[in-house]
Amino acid sequence: MSTAMTFGQKQFIPTPPEKGSFPLDHDGICKKSMVKYMNCIFSNNSNNSMCRNEAKDYLACRMEHNLMAKEDWTKLGFKEGEL
């Protein structure tokens, strides 16, 4: 395969995501909360505002098990005392 470029074509330079990678849960540590969230999304016609408790539980599980960086809830879209 050739990756030759023609004149005038800009080279693609990938940039990493702002927050870094999002490790996969290979061991299924948070699978129960993920399935609960996905079932909620499905049963509410993809309206994620109806599933904020489930989303928070899933994110909390990921943070507790170092599958994502610990973040302040306000940075994740949750207000103080909201849930």
Image: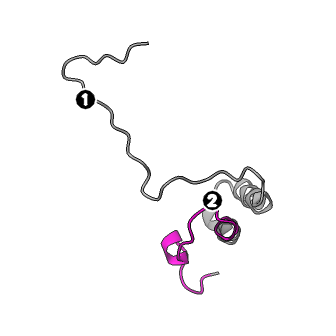
Q: Quadrant of residue 65?
A: bottom right
Q: Which residues are magenta?
A: 60-82
Q: Which residue is mark 1?
A: 10
Between 68 and 77, the one lying in front of the other is 68
Amino acid marked by disc 1: Lys
Whether 80 is among the magenta residues is yes
Q: Is residue 23 left or right of residue 1?
A: right
The residue drawn where x is 61% and y is 53% is: 23
Whether 41 is among the magenta residues is no
Q: Is residue 52 above or below residue 82?
A: above
In percent of width and height, residue 15 lies at 38, 45
In percent of width and height, residue 39 lies at 76, 56
Query: How dense is the environment of label 2, judged by Cα within 10 Å: few (below 14), some, or many (20 and up)?
Result: few
Q: Quadrant of residue 40?
A: bottom right
Q: Is residue 79 above or below residue 14?
A: below
Report helix, strand or loop for mark 2. loop
Report helix, strand or loop for mark 1. loop
The residue drawn where x is 53% and y is 52% is: 21
From the image, state whether disc 1 or disc 2 is nearer to you: 1
Between 54 and 62, the one lying in front of the other is 62
Q: Are marks 1 and 2 in contact (CB under 8 Å)?
A: no
As drawn, the residue found furthest toward the bottom would be 81
Q: Which mark is residue 47?
A: 2
Amino acid marked by disc 2: Asn
Between 67 and 45, the one lying in front of the other is 67
Name the image quarter holding the C terminus.
bottom right
Between 57 and 65, the one lying in front of the other is 65
